[in-house]
Amino acid sequence: MDRARLLQAFQDIVGEGNVVFHPDDLLVYEYDGSVDRGIPSVVVLPGSSEEVSRVMALAYQENIPVAARGSGTGLSGGAIASQGEMQISFTRMNRILQVDVENRVAVVEPGVVNLELDTQVRKSGLRYAPDPSSQRACSLGGNIAENAGGPHCLAYGTTTNHVLGLEVVLEDGAMINLGSSIDSPVRETPGYDLRGVFVGSEGTFGVATKIMVRLLPVPQAVKTFLGAFPDIDSACTAVSSVIAQGIVPAAMEMMDAVTIQAIQKTMDAGYPNDAGAVLLIELEGLQEEVEGVGNRVEACLWDTGAIQVNVAQEEQDRVKLWLARKGAFGAFGNIAPNMYLVDGVVPRTKLTQVLAEVSEIGSQYGVTIANVFHAGDGNLHPCILFDEREAGALDRATEASAEILRLCVAAGGTLTGEHGVGLEKKEYMPLVFSTEDMAAMRQVRDAFAPENRLNPGKIFPDGEPYQPPAYRPSPGMSL
């Protein structure tokens, strides 16, 4: 089928105004939140599961690869049409279909924004726990694809722990259900956990068109601490001290001096301008429990060298602290116009050591690195700040990112905690997985999408296994 007839066929399915094909309009879909780029051949915006099925069936018939796209906030290139694929955008499928307060579940379409769901269900005394930093913009479909986390995943787990059932369209247009039936609030189902396999498959298995999620009650009490420290080392010691007490906070976030100063230039968040690091700790639960545990947490902060400890007394104070934390990435625009965000994981006991090495890597490659991360579970987010207009700046940022990932793996960690592999990290998969490991993964993918028509070119390396460059940890800092 020629291009004109194909475009008309898509328009017949979704409506004339819901097919984007002019080159200037397609530029809007060139980016996600990463540094990768790719212009799709066409973008189709379906309005229902049935339309998705018909669009996918037509694309399959015409041998057209497909990349799904939610809000475009991903940080690993997962929504990029790197090979000029067709994109299916879910911005029209943004309805909250059902909120079952009694059974504490909700059914949503993939284009629903994370925060909109949470805001809606809080009116009924419930909440949706996963809260990525892009919560105000990211969509549930993208959260499913990447198994997104967020500050509160320390206590409540990532997206996969909150998804009960999925309606999925496969590469040939077939529609299936995984996990609990979308029409039933049953929380557990027999058989293989295909729902769990699908969450985090980065759009390579199929596209979710309806999602049933678990809701939790709003906690009776919440207490939020801001501990300021003279340096990263003492803040990391505080993290270990709290966990050693047997305390698992709802959230435990750390920001370094570069991040603090960037945020304070954007808003007065109450972060001390002269602090080397701040630790944001949130406790949730029954009132008496939160008060008792809170006293122990505060003692840990002072005992490990805090120079200041503040407690959010009012809800607006708490909201302000979190607004600053979740706005950190945007605040980095005060330092440089571009950011390459690395998403590596290390054991908590290696935080101090690894962060020191990250600083060394920044110095070697001549880039500024800011650190803002989920300290409680060792999920680092070194933010490499640069100006891509400078010759060689993007290359240096990319090389520095590779070294940080190698460092995380050498420390006993891994390549990603919540952002996915996508385009960004696929060449580094051999650092963690053997050829046999990845062959097994491909077999699982092929069970869902045997023609590899969905998000091709993602996750698996295309060329030779990654060979780390000459950089090595400095003396006395080896892992």
Image (spheres, rainbow, N blue to C red):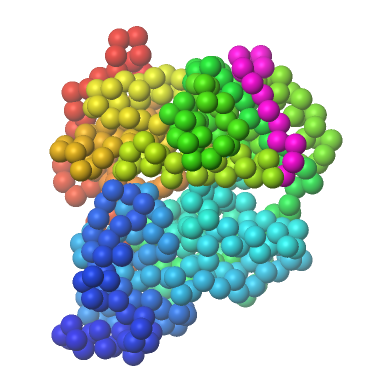
Residue at the top extreme, as displayed: 476
Q: Position of residue 91 (x, y in %)?
A: 44, 70
Task: Inspect the magenta stretch and tell me whether residue 361 lies in it.
Answer: no
Up/down of 3 relative to 65, above or below: below
Q: Quadrant of residue 174?
A: bottom left
Residue visible at 16% across and 46% down?
A: 463
Magenta segment range? 302-315
Q: Position of residue 271 (x, y in %)?
A: 57, 30
**Observer-nearest of 330 and 397:** 330
Q: Quadrant of the C terminus?
A: top left
Task: Inspect the magenta stretch and tell me whether residue 313 lies in it.
Answer: yes
Q: Position of residue 38 (x, y in %)?
A: 23, 59
**Observer-nearest of 336 and 251:** 336
Q: Position of residue 113 (x, y in %)?
A: 53, 62
In the rendered structure, the answer to whether residue 404 lies left or right of residue 295 reads left
In the rendered structure, the answer to whether residue 474 lies left or right of residue 304 reads left
**Observer-nearest of 108 and 457:** 108
Up/down of 421 relative to 14, above or below: above
Visible residue check, residue 217:
yes
Residue visible at 30% across and 10% down?
A: 475
Residue visible at 49% across and 67% down?
A: 110
Residue visible at 25% across and 19% down?
A: 472
